[in-house]
Image (cartoon, rainbow, N blue to C red):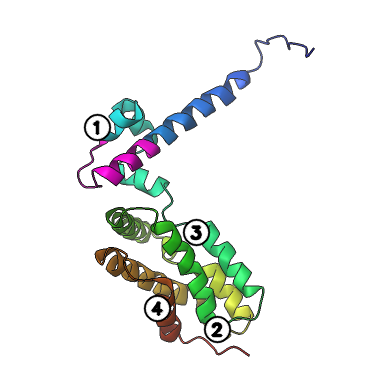
Amino acid sequence: MPQVRPSSKNDHGQGRAVPVRARSQASRDAIVQGALALWRTKGFAETTVTDICKAAGVSKALFYVYFARREDVLMEIEIFTMRDAHLAARAVASHPYELVDLIRAVIDVLERGMRRYPPELVFEAVLETYRLEQRALADGDAEGGLTFLFREPFEQARRDGRLPPDTDIERTARLSQILVGEGIRSWTARQCEQPLAQPLAQEISTLIGGAPAR
């Protein structure tokens, strides 16, 4: 039978830290899930912070502890799964490949993730990503969110000779990410009816001038 550890007045609250964090995460998750359920049924534009709080069973005061704006909840959903996209790119780069294959692997992960959500929600996420990028630029972060999607895959492509050795990775990644954003906006305007990854990857590969496979 396990022994019960006697309480100590000198634990500085450490014994309570885990339960408090667990409750905090549970409240945050409830807000995100409540918002997502409403956005699926009511749409993003028609859903207010008050609606989200009612659905999540939390107060507005608690909502604003975790999120400054409704759009911040949207970013929490991770419609764009960067980690999985980069893992897919690494898997492609582990075998002989062309640059278009690497780009398509990244966009394909994004497309599969986005198809789980209403087109309106994906469109709003793209707009919010643009807003975040503009804030980063205004704060002096010249690259920041403008390159995170393709910087790592393109660095690998340059090492593998799929991009010329003198390629400006930051500029190329920034341009490619802008093209992805524009492509997603057009795609959602068509209600995500057509495939996205292959035609968009081909367009980006052609525009940035990848080296042919050797």
Q: Are marks 4 and 2 in contact (CB under 8 Å)?
A: no
Q: Nearer the viewer, residue 199 or 154?
A: 199
Q: Which mark, residue 82?
A: 3
Looking at this view, is 198 or 26 the one in front?
Answer: 198
Q: Residue furthest front?
A: 193
Say what amino acid the circle numbered 2 marks.
Leu
Q: Which residues are magenta?
A: 32-50
- Mark 1 or mark 4, which is nearer to you? 4
Q: Describe residue 157's horizontal placement relative to residue 82 as left or right.
A: right
Query: Against 185, is 125 above or below?
Result: above
Residue ID for mark 4: 199
Q: Give whichever of discs 1 and 2 has the lower sequence position.
A: 1
Q: Quadrant of residue 146?
A: bottom left
- Which residue is identified by label 1? 50
Tell me which amino acid carries mark 3. Met
Quarter of the figure with the N terminus: top right
Q: Secondary structure at mark 2?
A: loop
The mark lying in front, picked from 4 and 2, is: 4
Residue at numbered disc 2: 163
Helix or strand or loop: what does disc 3 sit on? Answer: helix
Chief SS of the magenta region: helix
Disc 4 residue type? Pro
Residue at 42% over, 63% down: 111
- Callout 4 crowding tier (Cα within 10 Å): few <14, some 14–19, many ≥20: some
Secondary structure beneath dot 4 equals: helix
- Tag 1, which secondary structure? helix
Q: Residue at x 39, y 78 (%)?
A: 199
Q: Position of residue 178 (x, y in %)?
A: 36, 70
Residues at circles 1 and 3 in contact by the CB criterion of under 8 Å: no
